[in-house]
Image (cartoon, rainbow, N blue to C red):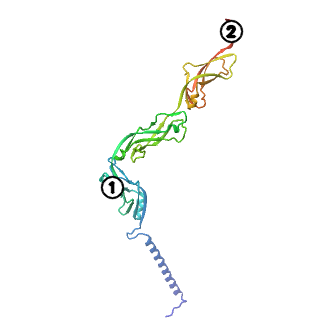
Amino acid sequence: MKWNLNNNWFTRIIAVFFAVLLFSYVYYEEESRNLSTSPTDGASITGSEVITNIPIDIVVDRDQYFVSGIPETATIRLEGPQAILTQTLATQNFNIVTPDLNELGPGTHTVSLEADGLSDQLDYSISPSEFELTIEEKKVEEHDIRVEFNEAAHLADGYTAGTPVLSTEAVRVSGAESTVDQISDVMVVVVPEESNVSEDIQMTLNVLVLDGTGDPLNVNIDPQQVDVRIPVEGTQRSVPIVLKKTGSADENFQYDLEISQGQPENVNATGETDALEALKNFPVEVDVSGITESTVRTVPLILPEGITETDPEELEVLIRVTPNDSENTGDSAE
């Protein structure tokens, strides 16, 4: 049989054959790729994830026992179907827990952590896989808070610290019986940020629970912080008031200065120690310029150097004015 290669029908048949062959190859490759990436017939893709810094739930009667030695957090590695894994990561509705420590009772024990609330389709491993902890009988005591404040190191010269005022005078301390029995001091330490303090000190401070050597103890403190206010007062001295005329006095009048009735004759001055020691009296200057008749004036007390405040801060002064000609008239009449 001879083929006529110049026949149009023969050329068309060959073209169709190769087109079908090429189409079949492409289709086969695409299906193979889909089969390799998509789960079929109940099969699924698996994966693994690591979650860190998960808090540990301690299963124990906290009113009866105090537990030490448990890490604050744990790390878990999850492995299983990707769909389940993705949902678990999104919700994180599981916990890492200790065994029931009430069943172990007081003593030192080696325990392993467990995952509670995970899907049965996930495998997991927890780090640390096991650790040693100590269970002790719990003890609760109430202790007064002592305030430590170095007055000489922080207050300005001439100022003293008053009695500290606390938001609560005592705290509730709980912990292992053997640890609570070591408590020697419960305190707050007041260290102002600035030196040469001349105003009241107000701070919120952590409460410290210390043993006999000054080391902190592993106990629970309620409350953990307290508000502290230390009144700061300057050194005071009472000195007599001395009235002094200032300004331009009218030569036609005599001026006499008197402290008004009911006004104090002494000033309580507050300030630096040296300034107070040098203060023998308190001068109050009264300006008589332009005054031609008796009058009462309120005069502010000017603070000398080293004096920070006075009580009172102002003084009522009677300026008694007498014309000079009246005195001359009186003399001639005699």
Spot occupied by residue 267 in the image (x, y as percentages of width and height):
55, 25
Q: Residue at x 35, y 54 (%)?
A: 133
Secondary element type, mark 2 = helix
* Three-letter amino acid code at the position of disc 1: His
Of 50 and 117, nearer the camera is: 50
The residue mark sitting in front, 1 or 2, is 1
Secondary element type, mark 1 = strand
What is the crowding at mark 1: few (fewer than 14 residues within 10 Å), some, or many (at least 20)? few
Spot occupied by residue 175 in the image (x, y as percentages of width and height):
36, 46
Exactly how many numbered labels are in the figure? 2
Spot occupied by residue 59 in the image (x, y as percentages of width and height):
34, 52
Q: In terms of sequence position, does the residue under pointer 1 or pointer 2 come before the other?
A: 1
The C terminus - image quarter: top right
Of 85 and 153, nearer the camera is: 153
Q: Which residue is mark 1?
A: 109
In the image: residue 3, left or right of residue 128: right
Q: Quadrant of residue 112?
A: bottom left
Residue 297, numbered circle: none
Of 302 and 13, nearer the camera is: 302
Q: Quadrant of residue 166?
A: top left
**Labels 1 & 2 near each other (Cβ < 8 A):** no
Q: Residue at x 35, y 51 (%)?
A: 67
Q: Is residue 134 visible?
A: yes
Placement of 258 over or under 72, stated as above or below: above
Placement of 154 over or under 124, stated as above or below: above
Spot occupied by residue 179 in the image (x, y as percentages of width and height):
36, 47
* Three-letter amino acid code at the position of disc 2: Thr
Placement of 9 over or under 172, stated as above or below: below
Q: Which residue is mark 2?
A: 329
